[in-house]
Amino acid sequence: MNAMVDLHSGGAKARMQAVLEAQRAAHLREGAPDAAKRKDRLNRCISILQTHSEELVEAMNADFGNRSKEMSRLTDIAGAIGPLKHARDNLDKWMRPEKRKVEAPLNLFGAKAEVQFQPKGVIGIISPWNFPVQLTFGPLAGVLAAGNRAMIKPSEFTPETSTVMARIFDLVFDEEEIAVIEGGSDVGAAFAGLAFDHLVFTGGTSIAYHVMRAAADNLVPLTLELGGKSPVIVSRSADIKKTAARVMTGKTMNAGQICLAPDYTFLPRESRDGFVQAANEAVAKMFPTIKDNPDYTAIVNQRHYDRIKGLVEDARAKGAQVIEINPNNEDFSQQEHRRIPPTLILDPTDDMKVMQEEIFGPVMPIKTYSDVSEAVNYVNANPRPLGLYMFSEDEAETQTVLERTTSGGVTVNDVIFHVSVEDLPFGGVGPAGMGAYHGKDGFLEFSHKKAVYKQMKADLLAMMRPPYSDTFRKQVAARMKA
């Protein structure tokens, strides 16, 4: 086995090209794997996650400086095993050809049509740093279920985790099945330019432009899982205390370093102060201390920490009221790790950077409205988000908001949770991404849907050949009728 490919030199692209060619040759030589082989690959992924879970948790903790180990076990280990098991347990059903209707009169004489699901071949996966294990194995579940081979480029921002993943894949997979390519941004750029049969990229929209340009040179189809500013709209009918607790749970998970994190909240004007108080209470209950609390995740690196702090200071300088939720009044000016306490920014304006950039941190701008249509119009005036969150007990109002807005997905009366349902497609729209995976949608995303038509045995189509007869002309005239 030789699944680890550690590249830091000028020969990176040549080495990756050799791996790609070896995988493609194996795919052509061996053909589409049967269900048993696909399940075996899925089971091997499950096994290495189970066997090496604590090693992966420790690696993620080291990469972040501090990352909640309990959260890592839930989101990255269990969160990765779930999609693999779902794919394994539903694979037989997904693989069956799908019958399609043949129009009359051909269907009357035995013609048949179906869609067969064929592996695309070699799939590239560029995974991010924020959930480095789950966002590698999650798409891999669909890739393997569809019968493909994979090359994986994990993030250089979580090097300890990337190295562990490379090593544990190497224990149970041959390089011709799964290869892990380690390296920095130069290696990532070369990886994106390879002639894959499909490429999955999870990351920031700014990087996606470069990935898409590189893939275009080889007309490689893409699945882009990006992000954006996912809004929370709170109805007058919502329970403010419950809403604040759920919003702040999502905002503090992984210290807000989640593509689906709620990015700003729209409240009825009269509910703002109650929400702020409830948010303070919810954070104090979850994190009575923050500075040295192992359950509160650090910001992944200094550059990202400085960027988030800069968003807060820019908002403060432009007149926003900034409320730092710090239950134990701790001093964060001197700290071992890069922790930022949950921070509320009241009444932000559009000239503030915090309302222009995806925050990706524990900072929550709070806007207000007089009528919920103001919130809807604001969402629609900005780029379409990856997620939208509606808190309401009014079903008619909720449905109106869902119909009038477009987002990758929606969670009603909570945040983020739609991503946890494996039977729902997960994906963005517009600048939030393209394509979708999870469950059967992942199997379909990474399969070639081949149309197959089986002609009837009797040669009744002879009348369609020249010289054309009155019978032919009658058939054409019948088809032209409304």
Image: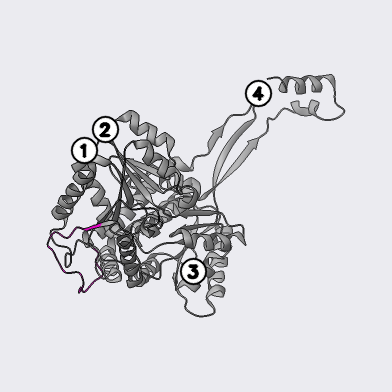
Could you say which disc has been placed on residue 393 in the image? 2
Pointer 1: what residue? Answer: 239
Q: What amino acid type is highlighted by mark number 3?
A: Gly
Secondary structure mostly taken by the magenta-highlighted segment of the chain: loop
Q: Nearer the viewer, mark 1 or mark 4?
A: 1
Q: Nearer the viewer, mark 2 or mark 4?
A: 2
Q: Nearer the viewer, residue 26 or 242?
A: 242
Q: Please identify the residue farthest to the front as the structure is shown.
A: 319
Q: Residues within 10 Å of mark 3 (few under 14, many from 20)?
A: many
Q: Are marks 2 and 3 in contact (CB under 8 Å)?
A: no
x and y, in percent, of residue 213 in the image: 57, 61
Disc 2/disc 4 C-alpha distance (Å): 49 Å
Residue 361 magenta-highlighted = no
Look at the image and give the residue range highlighted in magenta: 322-340
Pointer 3: what residue? Answer: 188
Q: What amino acid type is highlighted by mark number 1?
A: Asp
